[in-house]
Each structure stands twice: as C-alpha cells, then as structure tokens.
Image (cartoon, rainbow, N blue to C red):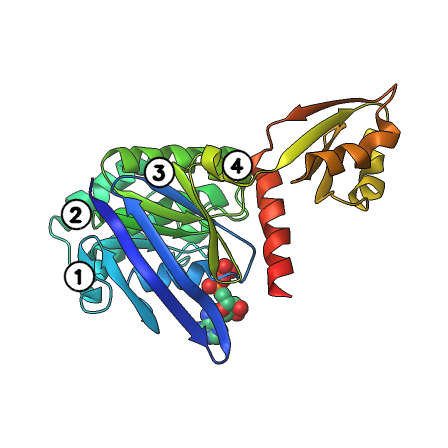
Amino acid sequence: MTLAIDVKGLNKSFGDKHVVQDVELQLEEGRICGFLGPNGSGKTTTLRMLCGLLTPDSGEGRCLGFDILAQSEAIKRRTGYMTQRFSLYEDLTIQENLQFTARVYGLDRRRERVAEALRGLGLYERRNQLAGALSGGWKQRLALATATMHEPKLLLLDEPTAGVDPKARRTFWDEIHKLSATGLTVLVSTHYMDEAERCHEIAYISYGKLIARGTAESVIEQSHLVTLHGEGPGIDRLSAEIAARPGVEMAAPFGAALHVSGQDKAALEAAIAPWRREPFHWKEVAPTLEDVFIHLMGRSQDNYQ
Ligand code: ADP
C-alpha cells in the first residue's frame, strides 16, 4: 500500500482564527476522497497546504512521497488543482486555454498534447470558440483537462461542480473515476451528497477539525445514529413539531415521508409516540449520509459554543 497523502498535526491560523486544527489525513494512491463540511470549516485551506500553496504553521508529513515543508515545489509540479471558479481564461479560445497551460508547465509535445486533450474532450471541432461561450458543464470539463494536462499524480478539486447541472456533474464524475483508475489520487471538496457517495472514502471537517473519516458505510456506522422513517398523509408537515421534542436531532421531510434521527432510540420512540397510530406508519431505516452529515454539523456546532 502506498500512501499518496500522509500528513498529521496540520495547523493554520489567520490572525487569531485557528482555521485548521491538528488535521491528520492518510490517503492511499489511486483513491478518491471526498472532503465535506460546512462553509468556512477549513477545506480549501487544507487543500492548499497539501499541495504546497500555503505553509502550515505546524504539522508534518508527505504528499506523493515528498516532504510537505521542505519539498513543496516537487509536490506542486505533480499536483493538479482546480477551484470552484473554473480557472479558465474566458477571453481565450478553448485551444488557447490548453496551449497556455501546456506552456506554463513547460510540457513537451505541446501541439500533440493539446490536440489529444481536445479530442478527449470532444471539443476538437469547437477548438476556436471562446472558453467563455461554453456552458457551465463544458467549462468545468475543460478546466479539468487543463488541470490534468501535465499528468499529475494528485488531483485536488475544490468544489469543482458548484452550480453545474446534475447531468454534467455525472459526466464529470465518470471522468474522475476514469482518472483514478489510472492511479491518480483525488481529493475533492463538495457539498453534494450524491458526489460524496461516489467517493471511495470521505473526510468530514468542521470548524477546522476532522471529525469523521472512512467509507460512507463506516461513517454512517460510526455515527451511531438511529433514523425512523414515517409515512402518512401530511406527515411532512409535522417536522417542526417533532424536531422540537427531546432526543430528536433532526426531523426532515424526504419527499412525502419524514426522517427523524437521533442517537437515543428510546427518546426517538417517545418523540414520535403521539403519531405512532393510523394513518401513520413508522419503520427504522439505515440513516443516509445526509442524515449523518446534519448530525455531525449539529454536534460540532454544540462543541464550538
Ligand atoms: P472552506 O473551504 O471549508 O469553506 P476555508 O479554508 O476557505 O474554508 O476557510 C476557513 C476560514 O479561514 C474561513 O473563516 C475563512 O474566512 C478563513 N480564511 C481563509 N483564507 C484566509 C486568508 N487568506 N486570510 C484570512 N482568512 C482566511
């Protein structure tokens, strides 16, 4: 087993704000890890420390076998980084964007590489169009092509699909899986549950602290969350009333059903007792990843106050 990322004790403060606190992360080569957590919890800052764009205040470790403090240039050269804002030049053509990247990285066989990338994207015929004229999904695929043109070993994606429609997101994720199958390691921050489920593993960070880590199944299991699924006419309208009862951490409509979650099963049963009768029906179900994330968010907010 080779670890592409192996860091511990990462800390970073901006002024008196301690935004990344003792973060430890190991990720095996070729894996896709989803980085989740509320806004402002330190995901971008952690990604930037991993690829050498930002120096941690303390901490140590290796990325791609290189020391994160002493060999950040070597890590940078082997890392692809794509941010939410696409990192494209909208007033250059599609082809010019790729040519520009190829030059910045000092790549050999530039003409061939650019043509290969254009064909791979299915944009060869449209190569002379301005990148700014592409739809969101295409822009994002072009940005991915520019971020991977230098054949990085590690790909860091910071909310790459924010604001992109579900079909384009799916195509993008197919692409990510293809890249990971070639041995590329991917760390991707996202707010989308369907994307979290497509990752091999997940890291959940909240207020700078890594509070859950593992496969989706193991993160769900570690949460010790119990979820009751209720159905019946108008049950979704009971969410506020049930959410206010003791022992309920979350009561949220799921389509026409209601999911009620908490860690104490007896308290949950007591909370729904007034509605445990016809025409309502309840059963215990496995919590979804979304149930677990809402639970984790609530718990860390409590710790913070
Ligand atoms: P996330 O990616 O999870 O949304 P960030 O890592 O971007 O979180 O930010 C974590 C916190 O650090 C936020 O409160 C943000 O305002 C702050 N922060 C990030 N970068 C800087 C910076 N360069 N200077 C000052 N504060 C920053």
- Horizontal and vertical percent position of residue 247: 74, 43
Q: Is residue 280 above or below residue 205?
A: above
Which mark is in front, 1 or 4? 4
Please report whichever mark, 3 or 2, sits nearer to the chain's N-terminal start.
2
Q: Amino acid at mark 2?
A: Arg
State the residue position of label 3: 176
**Foreground tag (3 vs 4):** 4
CA separation in Å, label 1 and label 3: 23 Å
Residue ID at (41%, 36%): 173
- In front of the other: label 2 or label 1? 1
- Secondary structure at badge 2 equals helix
Q: Quick check: is the Cβ at mark 1 less than 8 Å away from ligand 1? A: no
- Residue 186 or residue 104, whichever sits in front: 186
Q: Quadrant of residue 83?
A: bottom left
From the viewer's side, name the closer residue of 83 and 87: 83
Q: Name the quarter where the N terminus is drawn.
A: top left
Query: Which numbered disc flags the more N-terminal residue, 2 or 1?
Result: 1
**Amino acid type, mark 3:** Ile
CA distance for labels 3 and 4: 24 Å
Mark 1 Cα-neighbour bin, 10 Å: few <14, some 14–19, many ≥20: some
Query: Residue at coordinates 46% horizontally, 42% vertically from top-left?
Result: 137
Q: For mark 2, what is the residue?
A: 111
For mark 3, give the secondary structure. helix
What residue is disc 1 on?
A: 74
Q: Secondary structure at mark 1?
A: helix
> Which residue bears the numbered disc 4?
220
